[in-house]
Amino acid sequence: MITAEQVVATQKANLQSAYGMTQQAFAGVEKLVELNLTAARATLAESAEHAKAVLAAKDPQEFFALQAALFQPIAEKAAAYNRHVYDIATGTASGLQKSIEAKLVEGQQAVHGMVEATVKNAPAGSEPAMAMLKQAMSASQNAYESVQKAVKQATEVAESNLHAVTETAVKAVKTASKKR
C-alpha cells in the first residue's frame, strides 16, 4: 500500500527534478545568448574596420581585393558559429537526456519494486498471471533499451555527418577564396 508520505516524497523529488532540468535548459539559453552577443560585437567591430579599409582604398583594384578578402573569413566564422551553436545545443540536450534517463531508471525501479511486492503478496493460484506480469515488465525494459541504443546510434551518425559537411564547406570556401 502506498502511504501519504511516499506520495509527498515522490512529488518533492519530481519537483526537484523538474527544477534541475529547467536550470539546465536556462543554462543552455544563457550560453546561446552569450554566443550571440559575442558574435554581434565581433561582427560590428569587424564591419567598422572593413568599412574604414574600403573607404581608404586608393584604387578600384584595392577596393575589390578588400571586398573579396571579406568573404573567406565570413564563411569560416559562420561555420565556427554554427559549430558553437551545435555544441551548446547537444550539450544541453545531453544533460537533459541524462536527467530524464535517471528519472526513468528511478521510475522503473519503483515499478519493479511494486511488481515484486504484488507478486509476493499475490493470492494462491495467481502465479500464471504474476509470471505474465513479470514477463511483460522484462519485455518492456528490453524494448526501451533497444530504442535507447538506436537513438544513440542515430545521434552519433547525425553528428558525424554534420561535422563532415561543415568541414567540406569550410574547405570549399578556402579553395574558392584562394582561386580569386
Image (cartoon, helix red, strand yellow):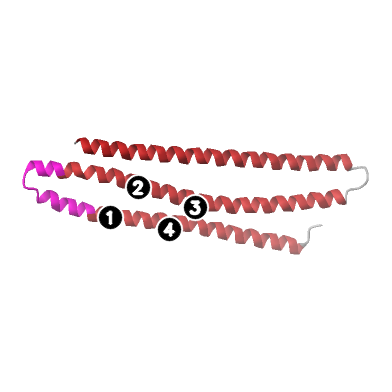
Q: Amino acid at mark 3?
A: Thr
Question: Image check: 54 left or right of 81?
Answer: left
- In this view, the residue farthest toward the right is 124
Q: Which residue lies under the disc numbered 1?
A: 42
Q: Amino acid at mark 1?
A: Ala
Could you tell me how far apart the alpha carbons at marks 3 and 1 are, in whole angstroms? 25 Å
Q: Which residue lies under the disc numbered 2?
A: 80
Coordinates of residue 27 in the picture (x, y in percent): 47, 58
Magenta-drawn stretch contains 54? yes
Q: Which residue lies under the disc numbered 3?
A: 92
Q: Residues within 10 Å of mark 4 (few under 14, many from 20)?
A: few
Q: Residues within 10 Å of mark 2 (few under 14, many from 20)?
A: some
Q: Earlier in the sequence, mark 2 or mark 1?
A: 1
Question: Image check: 50 left or right of 4?
Answer: left
Q: Nearer the viewer, mark 3 or mark 2?
A: 2
Q: Nearer the viewer, mark 1 or mark 4?
A: 1
Could you tell me how far apart the alpha carbons at marks 1 and 4 are, in whole angstroms? 18 Å
Coordinates of residue 30 in the picture (x, y in percent): 43, 58
Provide the major secondary structure of the magenta segment. helix
Q: Earlier in the sequence, mark 4 or mark 2?
A: 4
